[in-house]
Amino acid sequence: MVQASAKMCDEFLDFFMGKVAALRATMSRALVCGRSVTAIRGLVAFQPISLDELIKIIGKAMPSGLPDDMIPMRLFKEVFPVVAPLILHIINTSLSSGIVPDNFKEAVIQPLLKKPGLDASLAANYRPISKLPFLSKVLEKCVYHQLLVFMDENAIFETFQSGFRALHSTETALVRVLSDIYLATDSGNSVLLLLLDLTAAFDTIDHEVLLHRLHHYVGISGLTLEWFISYLTNRKMCVRMGSYSSEYSDLPWRVPQGSILGHWLFSTYILHLGDICRELGVHFHLYADDCPLYLPLNTSGRLSISNLTNCLTKTKTWMSENFLSLNDQKTEAILFAPSRHSDSSLIDCGSFNGQLSASVINLGVN
């Protein structure tokens, strides 16, 4: 175990911030441009919520685990009937003004060892677990509900993105990919599956690019866009270990992990990936930052492999231009043959031959 101290907290903070800064330094922002949505109407303003809606949200809410929350969750729920009108006023004031309170944007990071047995003295062996104020999550949940309705009504979601949507899950994502693979192999084709790995995906996101996506891809404008600008501006984080803490540091990039909106924002950020895959005829099914690409192959495999290679090249270029880092060393590939008795060696997978594995793990399933 590492002995906690204020110095240790500062070192972890420097490491987590420095890692992301170094990644971003290897990339360059592309000219920010893109399609415009064909939404029936834009989302110009959030609607105020009712007391009944707030009561339901609070009733289903999980504790934030943030040490700075002034009232323990159990006590908060006991006194909630008394303070509910005040909390409702805070929430609705934020929605109607386009301003997120600054103290809602302060995250506490607690380092967690990635795997048992790793060297606990190396900061690289830890992942940053982010915790946010409870009321900030309540506010985000109110926003999230309205965003889901708007996205569904205007068919803006990526069809093959199963992350954090109603009736979409890791199970539906896996079933769809496996179904496509079985259909292809039953037809006598092999299928090459690539599992792309992103490094610190949420942490490197660029706020300017994200706001452009929200405006031009989703159709968010007016007070709603101002709310998101406020949400992303002046975010801070500190590292806390036991009773020790670092100073707060500004976060000029990233979407907050541990938040309600983080995964939705990331899914919006990468909407263009689907366009790249469709353009080249490559199948895909995303779940947040998990990106499987796959394609049926015949015995020659040449044209399909070329499509997949071009798709991967375009994807890597697009990611680099949008401050996302594809980790080539952790990208895996597997070839599914039409039957157990098929000779998969007849399929030339080109540059992917050296990456082929006998088994891979996708969304936690081997």
Image (cartoon, rainbow, N blue to C red):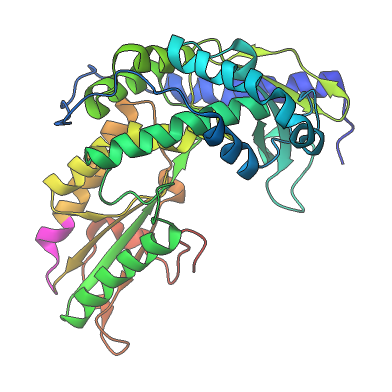
Q: Residue at x 12, y 62 (%)?
A: 302
> Left or right: 140 with respect to 168?
right
Judge whether 22 appears above or below 230 on screen: below
The segment highlighted magenta reads 299-305
Q: Quadrant of residue 333?
A: bottom left
User: Residue 282, image x and y in percent?
Assistant: 19, 54
Query: Of 125 and 259, which appears nearest the observer?
Result: 259
Q: How many marks?
A: 0
User: Which residue ends up furthest to the bottom in the rendered image?
Assistant: 341
**Residue 301 part of the magenta segment:** yes
User: Residue 351, image x and y in percent?
Assistant: 26, 55
Query: Of 191 and 343, which appears nearest the observer?
Result: 191
User: Residue 206, image x and y in percent?
Assistant: 40, 21
The reply to whether residue 337 is visible in this rendering is yes
Judge whether 14 appears above or below 333 on screen: above
**Residue 288 part of the magenta segment:** no
Judge whether 162 appears above or below 322 on screen: below
> Left or right: 335 with respect to 309?
right
- Quadrant of the image for the N terminus? top right
Q: Quadrant of residue 341?
A: bottom left
Q: Quadrant of residue 320?
A: top left
> Left or right: 148 with respect to 302?
right
Q: Residue at x 27, y 65 (%)?
A: 192
User: Residue 239, image x and y in percent?
Assistant: 73, 24
Q: Residue at x 60, y 18 (%)?
A: 105
The reply to whether residue 252 is visible in this rendering is no
